[in-house]
Image: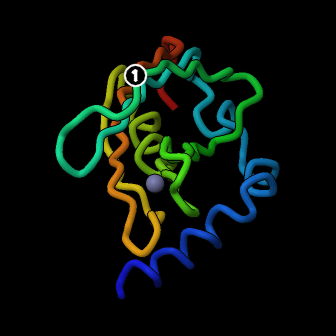
Amino acid sequence: MQHFRRNRVAAERFAGRRQREDEAPRLSTRVPDLTSLSLSIEERTGGNSLTEPKYLRRIVVGGAPALFLLPCGDPRCNEGGHDVTPYIMSSLLRREGSFQGEDACCGSLGAGPCLRVLRYQGAAEYRERTALK
Ligand SMILES: [Zn+2]
């Protein structure tokens, strides 16, 4: 019954989403050199069939929170979603121009776990560094 425990964790993680967004540090504070960021996102199910068309999400670097919570694309999914914040922040802090990763949904579908897997591809640009800190 592993996934029931995971569901509760997920519920707690996502319940305070709005609050977390308000309290999170700004992206521009955490990564001051970042000038643009976009994420290309697609979802697959456990097999390998594409379930959702790819979509592009442009992040407004100026006011965005340093928080990347992406919803699960399956409307029947219960308390799912993807918190890819740690992955994306570590790429941005390393000044990576392109990066990708994936995250399995932590929600449930009826009595079973949700099998959606989100895959993201990020493209970021950074200000030239004039002096090393
Ligand atoms: Zn899901």
Which residue occupies the extreme left position in the image? 47
Considering depth in this image, is 62 or 70 the residue closer to the camera?
70
Residue 121, by quadrant, is top left
**Relative horizontal placement of residue 57, taking residue 122 as reference (left or right):** right
Question: Which colouring convention does the figure follow?
Answer: rainbow
Residue under pointer 1: 54
Rendered view: 71 above or below 76: above
Closest to the observer, 121 or 30: 121
Q: Which amino acid does label 1 sit on?
A: Lys
- Residue drawn at 32 percent across, 29 percent down: 99
Nearest to the observer: residue 133 or residue 9: 9
Label 1 packing within 10 angstroms: few (<14), some (14-19), many (20+): few
Residue drawn at point x = 56 percent, y = 15 percent? 36
Q: In this view, does 106 lie above or below 117?
A: below
Numbered-mark total: 1
Q: Is mark 1 on a helix, strand or loop?
A: strand
In this view, 126 is above or below 1:
above
Q: Percent x, y for residue 24?
A: 72, 50
Residue 2, image x, y percentages: 35, 84
Seen at 72% across and 56% down, the residue is 17
- Between residues 106 and 58, which one lies in front from this camera angle? 106
Residue 87 screen position, x and y as percent: 41, 47
User: Which quadrant would the N terminus be assigned to in this image?
Assistant: bottom left
Residue 111: give x, y in percent of width and height.
42, 75
